[in-house]
Image (spheres, helix red, strand yellow):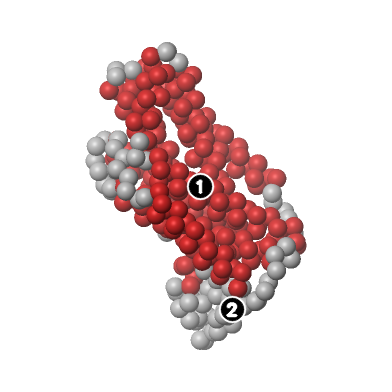
């Protein structure tokens, strides 16, 4: 699993849950005539997300030197911030997400607002899509390559398959456990983005270095093409670098940013309380 696949899996499934709740309520109330409106809303949200992705590539590519370091640093910090907000928002909302969506659908049905139904699904899909674009941009900046893109597409495909079985009443996975586990993984990924974002801003001389390398195992090579397990190119180090932003030679400020972020979000998580009821489709 790559960071990109984890991001697209989570975001696509969240969007699918909203769409599934809406379609299920329309079916229960015998209002399937609005299904086409819902699917047009989904399509419009996807198109907006793709346009934003193209805009990112055209507007923010081609930087060099200090400008590149600044862009990458701020992109990672922005991605980490939005990812944290998304995780905590879902943690608070998933207790009542089904009820809230059904109430909105009921209101639009009672007032004969097909555009309201369209807007509900459009903004939900577009929000998840825009979040995905920003998160993927941060992931690609951190660890680019064809595998990240392939992983992103794989995550979308897996989420669609899971959603299909959920809508058919075939439970393959506990959604409560799924969102809890993926939230923990994304928190670690966000911590890595913060640490790497700090590294880039230090490269751009925007942040002080203080202590350059608290430790440095990157120069260690056991033999030609063979590295220690925790080396950035090692069996373990390479995986955790791709997923969680591991660095084989971190600065003091990178370590502090990583640890302070984990401490802060742990306190907020405990305050909110990770005791949500499972979402049901």
Q: Which residue corresponds to the image point at 51% horizontal and 31% vertical from the top-left?
A: 123
Give residue 74's position: percent from left, percent from top: 65, 55
**Viewport quadrant of the C terminus:** top left
Residue lying farthest left?
Answer: 170
Give residue 92's position: percent from left, percent from top: 41, 43
Packing grade of label 2 (10 A; few <14, some 14-19, many >=20) is few
Q: Residue 172: which disc?
A: none
Name the residue beneath numbered marker 1: 85
Q: Can residue 15 be seen in this view?
A: yes
Q: Does residue 37 sit above or below 125 in this rendering?
A: above
Instruction: Report whether 179 appears left or right of 258.
Output: left
Instruction: Report whether 281 appears left or right of 224.
Output: left
Name the residue beneath numbered marker 2: 214
Figure label count: 2
Q: Which of 178 and 62 is in front in this view?
A: 178
Label 2 to label 1: alpha-carbon separation: 30 Å
Q: Which of marks 2 and 1 is nearer the N terminus?
A: 1
Instruction: Report whether 30 appears left or right of 60.
Output: left
Q: Does residue 9 sit above or below 198 in this rendering?
A: above
Q: Which residue corresponds to the image point at 58% horizontal and 76% vertical from the top-left?
A: 249
Packing grade of label 1 (10 A; few <14, some 14-19, many >=20) is few
Please, what secondary structure does the residue beneath circle 1 have? helix
């Amino acid at each position: 699993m790559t960071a990109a696949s984890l991001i697209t899996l989570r975001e696509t499934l969240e969007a699918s849950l909203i769409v599934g709740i809406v379609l299920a309520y329309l079916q229960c109330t015998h209002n399937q005539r609005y299904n086409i409106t819902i699917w047009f809303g989904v399509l419009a949200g996807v198109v907006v997300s793709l346009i934003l992705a193209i805009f990112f590539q055209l507007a923010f590519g081609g930087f060099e030197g200090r400008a590149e370091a600044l862009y990458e640093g701020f992109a990672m910090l922005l991605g980490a911030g939005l990812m944290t907000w998304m995780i905590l928002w879902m943690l608070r909302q998933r207790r009542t997400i089904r009820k809230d969506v059904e109430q909105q659908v009921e209101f639009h049905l009672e007032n004969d607002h097909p555009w309201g139904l369209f807007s509900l699904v459009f903004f939900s899909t577009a929000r998840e899509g825009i979040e995905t674009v920003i998160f993927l941009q941060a992931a690609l900046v951190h660890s680019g390559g064809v595998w990240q893109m392939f992983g992103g597409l794989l995550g979308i495909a897996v989420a669609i398959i899971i959603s299909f079985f959920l809508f058919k009443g075939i439970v393959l996975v506990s959604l409560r456990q799924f969102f809890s586990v993926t939230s923990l993984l994304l928190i670690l990924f966000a911590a890595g983005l913060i640490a790497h974002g700090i590294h880039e801003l230090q490269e751009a001389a925007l942040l002080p270095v203080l202590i350059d390398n608290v430790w440095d195992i990157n120069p260690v090579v056991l033999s030609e093409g063979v590295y220690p397990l925790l080396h950035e190119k090692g069996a373990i180090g390479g995986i955790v670098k791709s997923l969680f932003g591991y660095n084989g030679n971190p600065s003091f400020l990178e370590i502090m940013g990583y640890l302070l972020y984990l401490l802060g979000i742990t306190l907020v998580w405990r305050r909110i309380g990770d005791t949500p009821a499972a979402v049901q489709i």
